[in-house]
Image: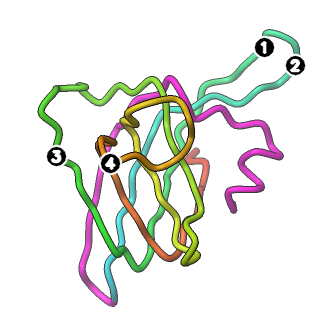
Amino acid sequence: MTLEQVYNEKYVLSDGEILSIHIAQMNGSTAKVTISARQYLKKEKYRTCNVEVTFTNITRISLFDDADILGNYSDITIARLDNGNYYVSFDPYGNTNKPHEQDNYIIISEKLEFEELQ
């Protein structure tokens, strides 16, 4: 799924948990981050699901943080940068959905895809 499809199919990525992170350097740099998410079904009705976020052709990755989030995160920033790359922070500094120099758990890549895991 593209980012637009994630929004159109009413997935809620905030208030989730990072379940796994896999980084590979074979045939270009890629990362797969599996998160718990929710999908809106109808008024006050959600279903929990796991979503794998795939980053291809990574230009920056910074997973260091001085505070332990234990995999849980309350917000997520996903932005398209001026150069066309995708910016994702699983521990953003604020709730602006814009990159900030104090964001943590950052991955920037040329391509971003989502897949719901069964």
Question: Of the numbered discs in the image, which one, if any, rests on residue 64?
Answer: 3
Q: Is residue 93 magenta?
A: no
Judging from the image, what secondary structure is the residue with disc 3 in?
Answer: loop
Closer to the chain start, of discs 3 and 1, is 1
Magenta region: 1-27
Residue hosting label 1: 45
Front disc: 3 or 2: 3
Residue hosting label 4: 101
Instruction: Tell me the distance, in whole angstroms, between the alpha carbons under discs 1 and 4.
Output: 36 Å
Q: Is residue 7 magenta?
A: yes
Taking the spot 87% from the left edge, 12% from the top edge, the residue there is 43
Residue 96: percent from the left, percent from the top?
56, 35
Instruction: Tell me the distance, in whole angstroms, between the alpha carbons under discs 3 and 4.
Output: 13 Å
Figure quadrant of the C terminus: top right
For label 3, count other residues whose C-alpha is less than 10 Å away and answer few (under 14), some (14-19) or many (20+): few
71 versus 1 height, above or below = above
Figure quadrant of the N terminus: bottom right
Taking the spot 58% from the left edge, 72% from the top edge, the residue there is 82
Residue type at mark 2 is Lys
